[in-house]
Image (cartoon, helix red, strand yellow):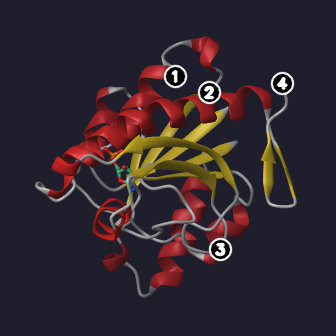
Amino acid sequence: ARLVVLVSGSGTNLQALIDAAADPAYGAAIVAVGADRDGIAGLKRAESAGVETFVHRIADFADRAAWDRALTASVAAHEPDLVVTAGFMKILGPAFVEAFAGRIVNTHPALLPAFPGAHGVADALAYGVRVTGCTVHLVDAGVDTGPIIAQGVVEVEDADHADGGEALHNRIKTVEHRLLVDVVGRLAREGHRIEDRKVWIPA
Ligand code: GRF
């Protein structure tokens, strides 16, 4: 399967996919990495792995719809079977979601439907939950609302309140990397169907 991965930041989830895809038995190859900003570690990770990159900054377009169309066209040019948003911090536009409907996989650092949005770790800490985690799900037109594929649980420790959630986010990311690699590999090798908002992967 052909994967396009979208990133906005450090790209540790991207790195986990790059490492997994180095084994041909994984069943997926990363054909391009896209970003919404320059100079991020995620792009450097792609370049080091010899993966083609592209950047579309919203500020360079007349409006969000024009950015949405450009991002859609750039990704479509790579003919992906799956698109993975791995720490991509922009909400995808309607053209993009329609073009790749049912084939966009996102990873979120909380147990959805709790704590959607850009501050899943901080919001979970502030609420005072004792367990949180990560969710790998398909992207629909909403924000972190699409069908859930898999979740991983991480316990909150008292000390997590002392550092603003950094250590908690690091523990979540360790689980997230494994979960994302597992889900993307299964989707790539087995395919999936969506029924009544549930995602079924055969075998
Ligand atoms: C991940 O925890 C992701 O779920 C969240 O931001 C983080 C991105 O990390 N949206 P990275 O760029 O993959 O290192």
Residue 175, relative to residue 58: is it above or below? above
Q: Position of residue 133 (x, y in %)?
A: 44, 48
Q: Which mark is residue 203?
A: 4
Distance of label 1 from label 3 (alpha carbons): 29 Å
Residue 53, by quadrant, is: top left
Callout 2–callout 1 Cβ contact below 8 Å = yes
Distance of label 1 from label 4 (alpha carbons): 20 Å
Q: What crowding class fits label 4: few (fewer than 14 Cα within 10 Å), some (14-19), or many (20 or more)?
A: few
User: Viewer-nearest of labels 1 and 3?
Assistant: 3
Say what amino acid the circle numbered 2 marks.
Ala
Q: Point out the tag, 2 or 1, that comes first from the N-terminus.
A: 1
Callout 1–callout 3 Cβ contact below 8 Å = no
Say what amino acid the circle numbered 4 marks.
Ala
Q: Point out the tag, 1 or 4, that comes first from the N-terminus.
A: 1
Q: Which residue occupies the extreme left position in the image? A: 162
Q: Which residue is mark 2?
A: 28
Taking the image as drawn, is residue 127 in sight? yes
User: Viewer-nearest of labels 1 and 4?
Assistant: 4
Q: Position of residue 200 (x, y in %)?
A: 82, 42
Distance of label 2 from label 1 (alpha carbons): 6 Å
Residue 113, relative to residue 26: is it above or below? below
Q: Point out the tag, 1 or 3, that comes first from the N-terminus.
A: 1
Q: Which residue does the image show at 73% across and 25% down from the upper left?
A: 189
Q: Point out the tag, 4 or 2, that comes first from the N-terminus.
A: 2
- Quadrant occupied by the N terminus: top right
Q: Which residue is mark 3?
A: 141
Q: Which residue is mark 1?
A: 21
Secondary element type, mark 2: loop
Towards the viewer: 57 or 156: 156
Residue 44, by quadrant, is: top left
